[in-house]
Image (cartoon, helix red, strand yellow):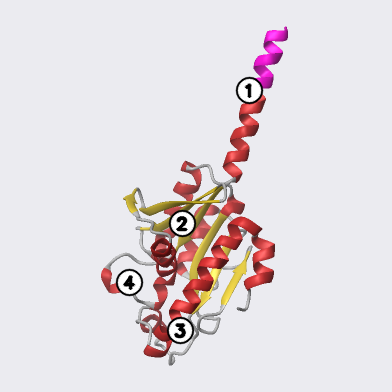
Amino acid sequence: MWEKIKIWLGFSKEIEKNEVETMKKYLIVGLGNIGDKYANTRHNIGFKILDFFAKKESLSFETVKLGDITTFKLKGRTIYFLKPSTYMNLSGKAVKYWLTKEKIPMQNLLVVTDDLNLPFGTLRLKTKGSDGGHNGLKDLQDKLQTTKYNRFRFGISDSFSKGRQVDYVLGEWNEEEESKLDERLNISVELIKSFVLAGVNNTMNEYNGK
């Protein structure tokens, strides 16, 4: 009987250990379209932020199933950075696959995306919400079957004339935006680190509207 109890206790401790390790894993997803012609477009700010983070920390992306991925250790946490290769409108498939494969809890997911409804460079973190007409978020919502996931929205403004939205989001940054991007990208990196270390609520209080 005692042997069975010891086996059960050992099994329970192993489960507890695995659960603790799982809670220390994070998936940061940058939304964008693959290919050089999209690299410097407003719609690809998700990719750009992850690339900027990787460059600062000397990380290299590896092409894997459904995307490019790299990992980063931060004070005992493991961060997976994912750039889906499914194109923007089918991002949900890649996100769901990597969440499941690495057993990352939904609360440790952060999706980085552009937002027309925010002034250029404005940062806003939210824990839930509608897709707001964004096709990448629409597919995520469909594949994850929830609107309750963390999203980091980077403002690209709505400075386009009627009927020119697609051209605008798929257009490249103008000279004024380019001159301000690095400063915005640096703050974006700090926001992501804060999300992992301080949690979503503290990060919202610290960075929203910055």
C-beta proximity under 8 Å, tags 3 and 2: no
Q: Distance between the residues labelled 4 and 3?
A: 17 Å
Residue 192 is labelled as: none
Above or below for 77 versus 50: above
Amino acid type shown at disc 1:
Phe
Bounds of the magenta segment = 1-11
Q: Which tag, 3 or 2, sits closer to the chain's start?
A: 2
Query: In this rendering, would 123 be left or right of 170?
Result: right
Q: Distance between the residues labelled 1 and 3?
A: 53 Å
Q: Which tag, 4 or 3, sits closer to the chain's start?
A: 4
Amino acid type shown at disc 4:
Ala
Q: Which residue is denoted by mark 3 in the rendering?
A: 180
Name which quarter of the figure residue 31 lies in. bottom left
Inspect the magenta stretch and tell me whether residue 108 lies in it: no
Q: Which tag, 2 or 4, sits closer to the chain's start?
A: 4
Give percent across and percent down for residue 2: 72, 9
